[in-house]
Image: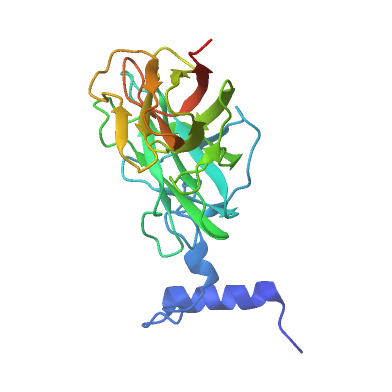
Amino acid sequence: MLRSVSSLALALAILCACSGSDPCEGTHCGSKQNLREGDDHGDSLEAATPVGCMEPFHWVEANLDNPEDVDLFSFHVTAGRIYRFSCTGFSSGYDPSCSVELLGADGLTLPGSVGTGGISTYQSAVLATQDGPVYARVTRNRNSTSAFNPSYKYSLVDRGPDDFANTLTEATPVPIGATVSGYVEPAGDVDVIALNAVAGRAYRLTCRGEYASHNCGMRVRGPEGEVLFESNTFDYRPRSETFDLQVMQEGRHTVELFLFWGGISFDAIGDYTFSVADQEP
């Protein structure tokens, strides 16, 4: 007669605990998956808590049971979509009490993922390049000078596909006279648009961030890829950006749009609007 699953698991657990050598070493052993007593989420990839994408502004409570605790979460991503894992935890200062790092199946930092911290919230996002599992590693924020706070909340949001192209060759066409909206994420994301400019004409290019603290920047290139204008990213004063493009050479011009740190902005992600107006009557 075959043993029940529960009796097999019990026998294996006894062997793991009592034998001189560990029969579970190098295998997928159930007892290795168990959480430490008092821990709410696993410390390893094998013991990661599976999570699904949530509605915006939905949070789940969790705890780091000691200052060295690590909470691992696993989720599946689809290529071409942006995923953001966030944790929020209050400290006596402005910095969040927790931090997040995204890992690949190999346990290493996921290429292309960027982590940023704001007031009480830390988030890490990535534009997935292939389907598969991703892991979020939540730890105490080592940069926080506040006393350890064990409680935090986490959230996983599917931000959808990237809205604009990210390279000069694939730049998204935008007609003269149009106003478009975009979203920069992850931090460091660059949206690239293309304009068909007419020689001898002037166009006013304007980029504004959603919030005054979000500095919207531009890098404008001519038909040969030469840089005609670039925002000063070392000027941290909150502002929008305007550039009057005097077209010397007719043809395809590109504009790279991005947000950068400034004012009280910590994360350099968010909404912006871009407009291109013909200055000629």
> At which x and y percent is residue 234?
22, 23
Q: Is residue 141 left or right of residue 180?
A: left
Residue at horizontal 37%, vertical 25%? 217
Q: How is the image coloured?
A: rainbow
> At which x and y percent is residue 87?
46, 34
Residue at the outermost front position: 200
Q: Is residue 20 above or below residue 111?
A: below
Residue at horizontal 25%, vertical 33%? 143
Q: Is residue 111 above or below residue 6?
A: above
Residue at horizontal 51%, vertical 24%? 271
> At which x and y percent is residue 136?
46, 48
> Nearest the camera: 207 or 75?
207
Residue at the outermost right position: 1
Residue at the outermost bottom position: 1
Q: Quadrant of the N terminus?
A: bottom right
Residue at horizontal 47%, vertical 36%? 191
Q: Can I make out residue 97 in this image?
A: no
> Nearest the camera: 16 or 150?
150
Q: Can I make out residue 170 in this image?
A: yes
Q: Is residue 28 left or right of residue 3?
A: left
> At which x and y percent is residue 219?
35, 31
Q: Quadrant of residue 241?
A: top left
Q: How many marks?
A: 0
